[in-house]
């Protein structure tokens, strides 16, 4: 009796260990191998295997084995009728060789014997969770050559349930991971489609304006660089690039003659040209963007912090920070490229303009971020040299503005400038 209790306690603590191992081990194969080892150790068995049932292929796949060979045996083709019989219950700890049990079990034992005759397994226990066969636990004879007792079988059945739960959880997790991967791919596809659409729109806008080809793309680039310099996260930066590409989308509604006029637009036609801000806002408001405030940025990209801009004459903090970045990127591109009625200005003039207009047309913090980004490129502090490369197309000596940038920064940089917050 005492011996029985001792064995029972041993089995009970092994069961607890097994549950813990299954819960703690993250690697699936390792979990199954450890579980098998615990089962074999508990009952002093040399030979055993955990075999997973792959329903779609109708095969049994060895995932862990001990005492039969160094390598896992090949898959075993499975008969659907055997699956049904195993799931029917009553086959927990079924001895394949003892002449016992009901007629149905005898038949099942015979079939299973044929399947596993080469491996010397004696006991088969189906791993069933929620009426689904997940696999089988196969066990050889005990080292002592004793027959399996009722307690042994109960222990095996309880342990098999633990292993079944482990396999079931793994499958669930794998399924969730597949779904998550599918969703991620779907999201990436959507994002790519959105970006392609944005680029196509930008090309359409710039196509209409003969003199400013590539303007939207360049503004997108400047916006990206400024936002990064201001410490924005990747998503906010991506939003800023999109805003750069789309800021002039309202020009689609402006007469081509006005956009391409080889002279300054007279006061009579100015409202139509300036109306591209509101037109762009209204058009972009119809689209659900993955990034915030794109329509508002387009609306306010011609505002000035001193209130002298359009369309709403907003001042200072009333203007979204993204629109302020756009204003600077947009103006910088206008100043550095030739227009029909105006040649590009020298880089010296432009840097001075930025300094003088900080606090009037431009947000000082945005000017500081842009100047810092250009200076870093000139000094070779960044791998990215996209601004200086862009400028080098039109200017011979971009490096010459270094002292002017240093001077601008010395004048404008102040700890009180808030340069790191994006609007939501
Ligand atoms: Fe504009
Ligand atoms: Fe523009």
Image (cartoon, rainbow, N blue to C red):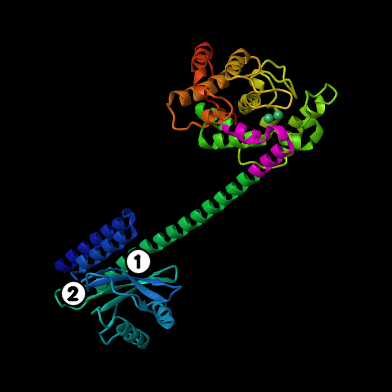
Give the quarter of the image for residue 89: bottom left
From the viewer's side, name the closer residue of 125 and 270: 270
Residue named by callout 2: 142
Q: Is residue 287 above or below residue 140?
A: above
Residue 188's x, y, as percent? 55, 49
- For image coordinates 43% across by 59% down, the residue present is 174
Q: CA distance from mark 2 to mark 1?
A: 21 Å
Give the quadrant of ligand 2.
Answer: top right
SS at mark 2? loop
Question: Is the distance from the Cβ of mark 1 to the nearest ligand 2 atom less than 8 Å?
Answer: no
Q: Is residue 205 magenta-colored?
A: yes
Is 106 above or below relative to 214? Answer: below
Q: Magenta region's main secondary structure?
A: helix
Mark 2 vs 1: CB contact within 8 A? no
Q: How many C-alpha atoms fall within 10 Å of the one at disc 2: few (<14), some, or many (≥20)?
A: some
Q: Position of residue 31 (x, y in %)?
A: 30, 59
On screen, residue 359 versus residue 123, left or right, reads: right
Q: Where's the N terminus, which quadrant?
A: bottom left
Q: Which residues are magenta?
A: 198-221
Farthest front residue?
A: 396
Q: Is residue 197 above or below residue 298?
A: below
Q: Is residue 58 left or right of residue 256?
A: left
Q: Residue at x 59, y 27 (%)?
A: 394
> Considering only order in the chain, which callout, 1 or 2, is on the residue closer to the N terminus?
2
Name the residue beneath numbered marker 1: 161
Q: Position of residue 161 (x, y in %)?
A: 35, 66
Residue at screen point 31% across, 85% down: 114
Tell me if residue 43 is in the magenta stretch: no
Mark 1 lies on a secondary structure that is helix
Viewer-nearest residue: 289 or 341: 341
């Amino acid at each position: 009796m005492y011996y029985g209790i001792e064995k029972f306690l041993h089995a009970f603590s092994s069961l607890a260990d097994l549950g813990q191992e299954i819960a703690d081990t993250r690697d699936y194969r390792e979990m199954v191998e450890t579980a098998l080892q615990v089962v074999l150790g508990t009952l002093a068995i040399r030979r055993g295997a955990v075999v997973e049932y792959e329903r779609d292929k109708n095969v049994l796949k060895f995932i862990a084995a001990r005492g039969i060979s160094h390598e896992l045996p090949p898959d075993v083709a499975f008969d659907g009728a055997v699956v049904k019989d195993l799931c029917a219950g009553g086959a927990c700890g079924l001895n394949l060789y003892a002449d016992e049990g009901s007629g149905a079990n005898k038949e099942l034992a015979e079939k299973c014997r044929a399947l596993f005759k080469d491996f010397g397994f004696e006991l088969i226990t189906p791993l069933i969770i929620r009426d689904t066969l997940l696999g089988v636990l196969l066990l050889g004879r005990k080292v002592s050559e004793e027959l399996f007792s009722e307690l042994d079988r109960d222990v095996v059945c309880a342990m098999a349930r633990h292993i079944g739960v482990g396999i079931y959880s793994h499958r669930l997790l794998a399924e969730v991971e597949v779904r998550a991967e599918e969703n991620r791919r779907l999201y990436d596809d959507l994002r790519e489609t959105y970006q392609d659409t944005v680029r196509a729109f930008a090309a359409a806008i710039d196509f209409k304006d003969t003199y400013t080809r590539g303007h939207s793309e360049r503004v997108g680039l400047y916006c990206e660089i400024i936002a990064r310099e201001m410490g924005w996260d990747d998503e906010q930066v991506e939003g800023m690039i999109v805003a750069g590409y789309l800021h002039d989308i309202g020009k689609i509604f402006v007469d081509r003659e006005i956009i391409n006029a080889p002279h300054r637009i007279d006061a009579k036609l100015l409202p139509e040209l300036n109306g591209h801000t509101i037109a762009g806002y209204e058009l972009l408001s119809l689209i659900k963007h993955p990034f915030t405030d794109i329509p508002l940025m387009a609306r306010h990209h011609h505002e000035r912090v001193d209130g002298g801009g359009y369309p709403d004459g907003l001042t200072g903090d009333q203007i979204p920070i993204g629109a302020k970045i756009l204003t600077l990127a947009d103006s910088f591109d206008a100043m550095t490229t030739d227009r029909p009625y105006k040649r590009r200005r020298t880089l010296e003039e432009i840097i001075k303009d930025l300094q003088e207009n900080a606090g009037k047309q431009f947000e000082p913090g945005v000017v500081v971020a842009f100047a810092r980004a250009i200076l870093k490129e000139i000094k070779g502090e960044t791998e990215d040299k996209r601004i200086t490369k862009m400028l080098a197309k039109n200017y011979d000596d971009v490096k010459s503005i270094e002292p002017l940038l240093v001077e601008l920064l010395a004048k404008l940089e102040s700890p009180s400038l808030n340069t790191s917050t994006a609007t939501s």
